Amino acid sequence: MDVQGTARHRSGKAEADPVIVRYTGSRMLTQGGLAVMEEPGKRRRTLSITESTGDIPDWVNSLLPVGVAFACYVSIILAAGIEPKAQLIAYGAAAAFIGLECYWILRGLRNNHLGTMVTGILGAALAVYILDLFLSLA
């Protein structure tokens, strides 16, 4: 289907020449490039629980910097004369894990993966529960 319209620059100014736009289902092609429209199955894809093939390696790779930072945090806490060390380490571990889960929640929002968002929310809630359990026992 061809539609005639007026192209606009990022600044919002309209071009003088009309542009022929070709709509091809999920994308709208223009003479000046590719303008992506909302895909028809976006809601269905958001509610799906399937994960892309790169999620597990990305998850493992996102743990590496958090693990290195946490190791540095623990070594500084243990070397310092600050008490109570166990509580500070528990707060640091919970904060690191919750920060990582927030990253995955936002990634799920960006990629329209409900399963990733729910897993991130459950992981953050679990971290808070374990921290509360640890602090009540200590």
Image (cartoon, rainbow, N blue to C red):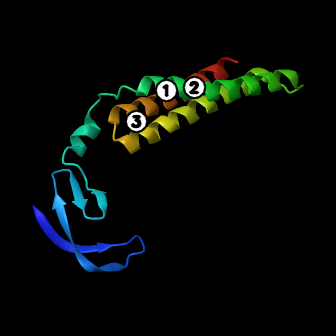
Which mark, residue 3?
A: none
C-beta proximity under 8 Å, tags 1 and 2: yes
Amino acid, disc 3: Met
Q: Nearer the viewer, residue 117 or 30?
A: 30
Cα–Cα span, label 3 and label 2: 17 Å
Crowd rating for badge 1 (residues with CA inside 10 Å; few <14, some 14–19, many 20+): few
- Tell me which label, 3 or 2, sits earlier in the chain: 2
- Against 120, residue 6 (above or below) is below
For discs 3 and 2, the disc positioned in front in the rendered view: 2
Q: Nearer the viewer, residue 67 or 53?
A: 53
Task: Report the residue that reaches farthest toward the right.
Answer: 81
- Going 41% across and 29% down the picture, which residue do you hit? 119
Quarter the C terminus occupies: top right
Cα–Cα span, label 1 and label 2: 6 Å
Mark 2: secondary structure: helix
Which mark, residue 117?
A: 3
Amino acid, disc 2: Leu
- Going 40% across and 38% down the picture, which residue do you hit? 108
Estimate the x, y position of residue 125 in percent, counting from the top left.
Answer: 50, 30
Q: Label 2: which residue?
A: 63
Q: Label 1: which residue?
A: 59
